[in-house]
Image (cartoon, grey):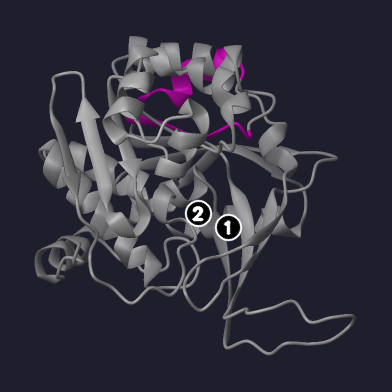
């Protein structure tokens, strides 16, 4: 395979400020302590963290022909990521967010949907974008032109070529379920947040939700639980929970997306499911110590050291 990791889907340009406690009334000004730019999104963050963790990575998605797109592509390339799969779309803005990060790490955002909803991977390119050990589809539910039959066909090709497939989503209600259903039959690891899993299924019990998605085709479910850690269940009957690491949270932006790449790195380094989830948790925790997606992740070596040395959050 040409790549270790191909990340397809939601790429966005983010401007993040910290700490933001309120929007000033009228034309007022509020002073903050930190501001940064980042490439984010379920595919963008995962691509950068995969590269930081030592995986040869291809980025596939859409950007506008604007200064946000220029900066984002340059930023991706600075991590050694192959950006030949990114499409620069005329007449469509780059997907972008203004992220207002509170002191507790939560981050309401203002988002411009932009190019993520317009790019299309042509069938003629399916073989080139699935020439990888792990194929990640990130942002199902936001990829308007790809969601449904096109994503299903792309995922089917990835599985036919022997890829390990992972899927992350952007889902707010059961109305997003058809787009998720389209790809689940070709999904090895379905990795939503617990809130997204609840919104899609209408359920609350973790085992019941995992059963819901595995009945629809997923071979395994990994739910991110925020400060409560992560949950895993697969068709072999293996099921477990991994607690979160004890950290001082600065910004939770991109934590779930970072988790995807950490999990992939664990799989490709021969780890058990338990250790792969722990590496994913460690990557996510490191992310939360910085401002902006992937800010706290440095390398696989550093992440393994953090995983070994950091204490576990009390239940």
Magenta highlight on residue 136: yes
Seen in the picture, residue 221 relative to 41 is either above or below; the reply is above
Magenta stretch, residue numbers: 122-142
Residues tagged 2 and 1 counted as in contact (Cβ below 8 A): yes
Image quarter where the C terminus lies is bottom left
Return the residue nearer the eye: 52 or 288: 288
Measuring from the top left, give residue 78's x and y in whole percent.
Answer: 48, 60
Tag shown at residue 77: 2
Q: What element carries label 2?
A: helix
Image quarter where the N terminus lies is top left
Q: Is residue 38 visible?
A: yes
Q: Name the residue under label 1.
A: 74
Q: In this view, does 195 lie to the left or right of 150?
A: left
Residue found 59% across the figure and 33% down from its top: 173
Return the residue nearer the eye: 141 or 145: 141
Residue found 44% across the figure and 39% down from its top: 58
């Amino acid at each position: 395979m040409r790549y270790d990791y191909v990340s397809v889907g939601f790429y966005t340009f983010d401007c993040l400020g910290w700490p933001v406690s309120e929007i000033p009334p009228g034309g007022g000004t509020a002073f903050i302590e930190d501001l940064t730019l980042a490439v984010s999104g379920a595919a963008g963050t995962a691509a950068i963290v995969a590269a930081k963790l030592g995986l040869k990575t291809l980025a596939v998605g859409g950007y506008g022909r604007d200064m946000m797109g220029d900066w984002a592509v340059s930023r991706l390339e600075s991590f050694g990521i192959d950006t030949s799969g990114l499409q620069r779309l005329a007449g469509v803005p780059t997907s972008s967010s203004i992220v207002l990060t509170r002191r507790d790490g939560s981050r309401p955002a203002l988002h411009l949907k932009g190019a993520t909803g317009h790019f299309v991977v042509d069938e003629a390119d399916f073989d080139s974008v699935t020439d990888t050990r792990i194929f990640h589809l990130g942002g199902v539910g936001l990829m308007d032109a790809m969601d449904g039959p096109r994503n299903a066909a792309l995922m089917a090709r990835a599985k036919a070529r022997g890829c390990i497939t992972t899927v992350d989503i952007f889902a707010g209600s059961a109305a997003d379920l058809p787009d998720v259903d389209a790809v689940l039959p070709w999904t090895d690891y379905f990795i939503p947040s617990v809130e997204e899993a609840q919104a899609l299924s209408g359920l609350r019990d973790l085992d019941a939700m995992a059963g819901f998605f595995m009945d629809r085709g997923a071979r395994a479910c990994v739910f991110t639980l925020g400060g409560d850690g992560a949950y895993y269940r697969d068709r072999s009957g293996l099921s477990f929970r991994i607690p979160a690491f004890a950290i001082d949270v600065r910004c939770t932006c991109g934590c779930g997306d970072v988790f995807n790449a950490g999990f992939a790195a664990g799989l490709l380094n021969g780890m058990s499911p338990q250790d792969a989830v722990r590496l994913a948790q460690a990557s996510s925790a490191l992310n939360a110590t910085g401002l902006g997606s992937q800010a706290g992740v440095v390398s696989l070596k550093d992440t393994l050291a953090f995983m070994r040395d950091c204490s576990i959050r009390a239940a």
